[in-house]
Image (cartoon, helix red, strand yellow):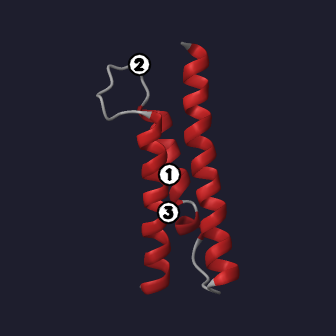
Amino acid sequence: MALESVRDDLLVAGVAAACAVTLTLSLELLANVSVSVWLHSTPLAVYFAYLFSRKGGPYGPLDTAQNWAVLAVAVTVVAGAYALFA
């Protein structure tokens, strides 16, 4: 059980970190858009929400590490769209 928990934590953390790096590189280098550090760190907020919401259960059927990872990707897309079009 502990190994599965670590694997889930690493999945969500890895996806959130990759999303934060991708968001930063795509906005700064490709689109030449300068935004605040708060917008760059929005994918990491998903990881922290995942981390601090894990207090021992019981968890619903939608509360999985894969869904949290998908949420991090969705937040990244929304933050990127906001930075480009706002």
Q: Is residue 48 above or below residue 1?
A: below
Label 2 sits on residue: 56
Alpha carbons under labels 3 and 1: distance apart: 11 Å
Query: Which type of secondary structure does the marked residue at label 3 adopt?
Result: helix
Give whichever of discs 1 and 2 has the lower sequence position.
1
Contact (Cβ within 8 Å) of mark 1 with mark 2: no
Q: Does residue 60 sit above or below 82 in this rendering? A: above
Discs 2, 3 touching: Cβ within 8 Å? no
Label whose residue precedes the other's in the sequence (3 or 1): 1
Earlier residue among tags 2 and 3:
2
Which residue is at a point 63% across and 44% down the rendered structure image? 14
Image-quadrant location for residue 28: bottom right
Identity, as a three-letter code, of the amino acid under mark 3: Thr
Looking at the rendered structure, the kind of residue marked 2 is Gly
Tell me residue 72's x, y (percent): 48, 52
Q: Position of residue 31 (x, y in %)?
A: 61, 85
Nearest-to-viewer mark from 2 and 3: 3
* Place of residue 60 in the rendered image (x, y in percent of width and height, measured from the top left): 29, 28
Residue 50, position in %: x, y? 46, 38
* SS at circle 1: helix
Above or below, 47 against 22 in this view is: above
Circle 3 crowding by C-alpha within 10 Å: few under 14, some 14–19, many from 20: many
Asked whether 43 or 74 is in front, the reply is: 74
Instruction: Write down the residue under mark 3.
Output: 76
Observer-side mark, 3 or 1, equals 3
Seen at 30% across and 29% down, the residue is 61
Q: Residues within 10 Å of mark 1 (few under 14, many from 20)?
A: some
Asked whether 35 or 73 is in front, the reply is 73
Q: Give amino acid for label 1.
A: Ala
Q: Which mark is residue 45?
A: 1
Instruction: Assess disc 2: are there few (<14), some (14-19) or many (≥20) residues with their C-alpha within 10 Å of its C-alpha.
Output: few
Q: Quadrant of the N terminus?
A: top right
